[in-house]
Image (tube, rainbow, N blue to C red):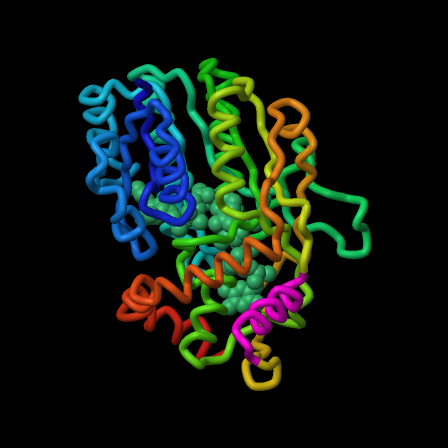
């Protein structure tokens, strides 16, 4: 039985990853560490609380003593590091927590792993570290050789973490792996990010705030496909290597908005509000995922239109989950972010 530390396990992708591994009956014991910040939510794991192979610990990756204790107590040999401040818009309002968790937290986790021993360390990074692509050059995509050129405080903090991980491989020969994925969508996505925000706003009878001209392009991937890719990299990736993960599914924000409106029987004119653009808004992301396909035989299984419908239906059926989030602190953030735009 492998014991794996999963940081950020109560967030969107972390909770999906935990669920997939346990439901499939993989021979693992998962130590789920999460600080439960505004976006971490134990309800994301509520169907798994009785599973004896999941141990949840509320704690901060910046707490070196806690990390060392966990290593000793559970004989941790593998880490999948999801924990992060992950929302670009919040990093524009205040970058402090991003540097603390994404950079300092990663350094503390790496040092703890180095001091206590580690067989596999997987850093979950993002395509945003590569910056932005021109929209008139569809032939150009991000490869693992694309230079890092982060444009937001969020992506700068993720790029800094990637550089640290890389340095620990070269300097200390730590068995690290890095993945850089495009935009995910699916169940348990915090309803501040575009797809769950738009779906839940429409279910509440509100408008959706589309930034700028709505023509920014993202390469969307269903969260289960991302989790499958991560499992493949953790098991079979080569130490020191970086793997891009993407859906080969470039689409503009306007097109996504149209698909969501259609699924919920809403019209553009009654439901869409153009708002001031995000400062420094990256225009286009596109991933070349040929390396992970070639080396690890991974390819996405879900078609965007189908998985988007499944996702929308999940929010329709899980109204108590998102309604309980869209209160309190969330409302304060929503006002700061949108009401004066
Ligand atoms: P999320 O914001 O939903 O979850 C992050 C989790 O980390 C939360 O549960 C939060 O409580 C926890 N956390 C934050 N600070 C912590 C700390 N100091 N100590 C312990 N736990 C802490 O994010 P997500 O969308 O699930 O993203 C997970 C990872 O994947 C992030 O590293 C992100 O950069 C990366 N990523 C996300 C996407 C995407 O589209 N969502 C795409 C590519 C990469
Ligand atoms: O590319 C991977 C990244 O994807 C991850 O590293 C991040 O953690 C994740 O949050 C996501 O970042 P984005 O900034 O691309 O996601 P977001 O959902 O915030 O925005 C998606 C697009 O939608 C982007 O072009 C901005 C636009 N948008 C977003 C919001 C919240 C709007 O038009 N209106 C909105 O209200």
**Quadrant hosting residue 27:** top left
The quadrant in which the N terminus is found is: top left
Give the image location of residue 156, x and y in percent: 52, 45
What residue is drawn where x is 42% and y is 55%? 189
**Which residues lie in the magenta part?**
252-266
Q: Give the mark count.
A: 0
Q: Is residue 224 left or right of residue 7?
A: right
Position of residue 258 in the picture relative to residue 312 (left or right): right
Q: Nearer the viewer, residue 104 or 215?
A: 215
Identify which residue is drawn at 68% across, 25% down.
Answer: 294
User: Residue 169 lies in magenta, yes or no?
Assistant: no
Instruction: Name the foreground residue: 291 vs 110.
Output: 291
Q: Residue at x 48, y 57 (%)?
A: 311
Above or below, comparing residue 135 to residue 204 in the picture: above
Q: For residue 281, say whether it is visible.
A: yes
Considering every residue shown, the one lying at the far bottom of the view is 270
Asked if residue 245 lies left or right of residue 93, the reply is right
Query: At 36% from the left edge and 48% from the top edge, which residue is drawn?
Result: 11
Between 206 and 61, the one lying in front of the other is: 206
Can you see residue 154?
no
Question: Looking at the picture, how far across and down is residue 168, in whole percent?
Answer: 46, 21
- The location of residue 151, given as percent across then percent down, is 59, 51
Q: Quadrant of residue 19?
A: top left
Label the magenta part by its dominant secondary structure: helix
- Residue 122 image point, x, y percent: 45, 28
Residue situated in front as seen by the camera: 89 or 315: 315
């Amino acid at each position: 039985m492998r014991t794996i530390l999963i940081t950020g396990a109560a967030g969107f992708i972390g909770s999906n990853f935990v669920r997939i591994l346990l439901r499939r009956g993989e021979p693992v014991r998962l130590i789920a560490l999460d600080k439960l910040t505004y976006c971490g939510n134990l309800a994301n794991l509520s169907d798994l609380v009785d599973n004896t192979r999941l141990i949840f610990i509320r704690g901060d990756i910046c707490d070196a003593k806690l990390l060392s204790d966990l290593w000793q107590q559970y004989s941790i040999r593998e880490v999948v590091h999801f924990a992060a401040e992950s929302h670009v818009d919040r990093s524009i309002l205040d970058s402090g927590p991003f540097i603390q968790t994404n950079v300092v937290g990663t350094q503390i986790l790496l040092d703890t792993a180095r001091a206590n021993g580690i067989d596999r360390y997987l850093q979950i990074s993002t395509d945003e570290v590569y910056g932005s692509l021109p929209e008139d050059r569809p032939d150009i995509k991000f490869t693992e050789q694309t230079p890092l050129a982060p444009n937001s405080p969020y992506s700068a903090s993720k790029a800094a973490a990637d550089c640290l991980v890389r340095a620990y491989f070269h300097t200390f020969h730590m068995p690290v792996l890095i993945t850089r994925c495009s935009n995910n969508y699916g169940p348990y996505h915090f309803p501040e990010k575009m797809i769950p925000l738009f779906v839940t706003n429409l279910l509440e009878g509100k408008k959706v705030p589309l930034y700028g001209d709505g023509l920014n392009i993202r390469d969307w991937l269903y969260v289960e496909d991302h989790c499958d890719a991560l499992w493949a990299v953790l098991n079979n990736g080569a130490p020191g290597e970086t793997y891009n993960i993407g859906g080969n599914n470039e689409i503009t924000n306007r097109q996504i908005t149209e698909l969501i409106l259609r699924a919920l029987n809403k019209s553009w004119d009654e439901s869409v509000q153009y708002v001031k653009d995000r400062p420094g808004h990256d225009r286009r992301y596109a991933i070349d995922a040929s390396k992970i396909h070639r080396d690890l035989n991974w390819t996405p299984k879900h078609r965007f239109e189908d998985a988007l419908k499944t996702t929308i239906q999940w929010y329709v059926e899980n109204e108590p989950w998102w309604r309980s989030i869209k209160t309190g602190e969330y409302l304060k953030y929503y006002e700061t972010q949108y009401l004066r735009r």
